[in-house]
């Protein structure tokens, strides 16, 4: 079945002679005037909706929720509508949702999933001890799907990682009930035989694709906006942040807290070092005061616009605060480990919760759950 996706892209691509690298060239579209009309005021808007982080509330649950180029989304939806799942390599810049898409595809066909973070587990031993046993396990009638996340980390940079790629070549074709979905940022780091088994699918989107998603969210939230302000928001904040959807959603929510899209002077959008440092100090003080853990967690989440939803940045600011306050210095390397984990997972906010709990313990502060 691995060849099915290759044929789908052959019929979509202008260059049908190049089967070595089946990929969709990203459409360049920097048009700004994408909101044709203003919204009408919503009578049913619930102000409490805005306090829920949109990044979490609108985390993609289906292919339709993903921001993808239209031809790519159409091809994937047609595959799933037939109840099929093909092996493939999803590649593109960081932040475009490759890992989320891989999980959605596997879940859409109710597959049994084995997730391998190749950034840390990209070795031959993992192939022998985890991947091969999973392939050989008794089938429950479901498709088995192995997601090889950040597979370009298992590259020729070291012998162990390169060995993983070579070990997988024959394994990928040996089991008819198993599919492989690879995600990577740099496909050139992956050996070519892998692509003959898992054809490349470029993941990308245009400014217009993002604007359509924003418009959908604003309408669901009952946000009032006029087309000029919406287009200006895209020009000033969306385009420079592409493809960082997390930051774009956080900024969008910040400007919509009143129930209407209202842009402020850029100088008032203070997400610089001063604002972040002050916020980190406040969080550390709350912990030292023994405040309810859930309150501290909620404070971090609802103020995620201060650190652009970048939890690694937030952990770094807390580390600086720990040092500045001359507290337990052993906390800093522990927080660094949490920051590293955040770079490897789909939902870094969960690691943030773990970091907060660890802070309570290492600072010797009791807390109420």
Image (cartoon, rainbow, N blue to C red):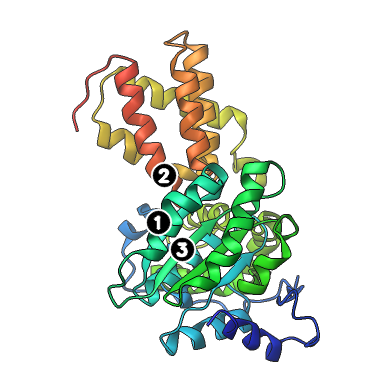
Q: Secondary structure at mark 1?
A: helix
**Badge 3 is on which residue?**
146
**Badge 2 is on which residue?**
349
Q: CA distance from mark 3 to mark 1?
A: 25 Å
- Residue 45's spot in the image, x, y percent? 34, 68
Dot label at residue 56: 1
Identify the residue shown where x is 36% and y is 30%: 356
Residue contact at pointers 2 and 1, CB within 8 angstroms: yes
Dot label at residue 124: none
Q: Give the vertical position of 26 relative to 351 (above or below).
A: below
For residue 365, which quarter of the picture?
top left
Q: Is residue 225 visible?
A: no
Q: Secondary structure at mark 2?
A: helix
Identify the residue shown where x is 52% and y is 55%: 255
For this orientation, the residue located farthest to the top is 326
**Residue 107 vs residue 269, the one in the foreground:** 107
**Residue 193 vs residue 49, the one in the foreground:** 193
- Closer to viewer: mark 2 or mark 3: 3
Left of 177 or right of it: where is 7? right
- Closer to viewer: mark 3 or mark 1: 3
For residue 244, which quarter of the picture?
bottom right
Identify the residue shown where x is 59% and y is 27%: 274
- Residue 48's spot in the image, x, y percent? 31, 57
- Residue 369's spot in the image, x, y percent? 19, 33
């Amino acid at each position: 079945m691995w060849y099915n996706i290759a044929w789908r892209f052959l019929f979509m691509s202008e260059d049908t002679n190049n089967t070595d690298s089946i990929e969709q060239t990203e459409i360049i579209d920097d048009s700004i005037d994408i909101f044709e009309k203003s919204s009408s005021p919503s009578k049913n808007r619930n102000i409490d909706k805005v306090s829920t982080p949109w990044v979490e509330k609108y985390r993609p649950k289906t292919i339709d929720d993903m921001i993808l180029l239209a031809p790519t989304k159409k091809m994937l939806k047609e595959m799933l509508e037939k109840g099929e799942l093909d092996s493939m390599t999803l590649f593109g810049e960081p932040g475009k949702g490759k890992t989320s898409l891989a999980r959605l595809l596997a879940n859409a066909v109710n597959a049994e999933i084995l997730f391998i973070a190749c950034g840390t587990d990209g070795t031959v031993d993992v192939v022998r001890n985890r991947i091969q046993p999973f392939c050989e396990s008794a089938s429950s009638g479901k498709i088995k799907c192995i997601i090889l996340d950040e597979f370009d980390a298992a590259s020729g940079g070291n012998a162990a990682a390169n060995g993983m790629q070579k070990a997988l070549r024959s394994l990928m074709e040996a089991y008819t009930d198993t599919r492989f979905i690879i995600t990577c940022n740099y496909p050139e780091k992956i050996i070519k035989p892998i692509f003959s088994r898992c054809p490349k699918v470029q993941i990308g989107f245009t400014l217009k694709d993002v604007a359509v998603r924003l418009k959908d969210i604003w309408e669901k939230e009952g946000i009032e906006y006029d087309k000029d302000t919406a287009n200006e928001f895209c020009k000033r904040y969306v385009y420079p942040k592409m493809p960082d959807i997390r930051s774009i959603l956080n900024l969008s929510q910040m400007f919509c807290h009143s129930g209407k899209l209202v842009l402020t002077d850029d100088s008032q959008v203070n997400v610089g070092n001063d604002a972040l440092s002050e916020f980190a100090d406040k969080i550390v003080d709350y912990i030292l005061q023994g405040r309810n853990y859930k309150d501290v967690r909620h404070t971090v989440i609802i103020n995620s616009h201060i650190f652009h939803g970048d939890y690694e940045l937030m952990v770094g600011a807390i580390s600086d605060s720990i040092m500045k306050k001359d507290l337990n210095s052993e906390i800093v390397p522990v927080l660094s480990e949490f920051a590293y984990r955040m770079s490897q997972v789909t939902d870094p906010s969960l690691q943030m919760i773990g970091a907060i709990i660890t802070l309570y313990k290492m600072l010797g502060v009791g807390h109420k759950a």
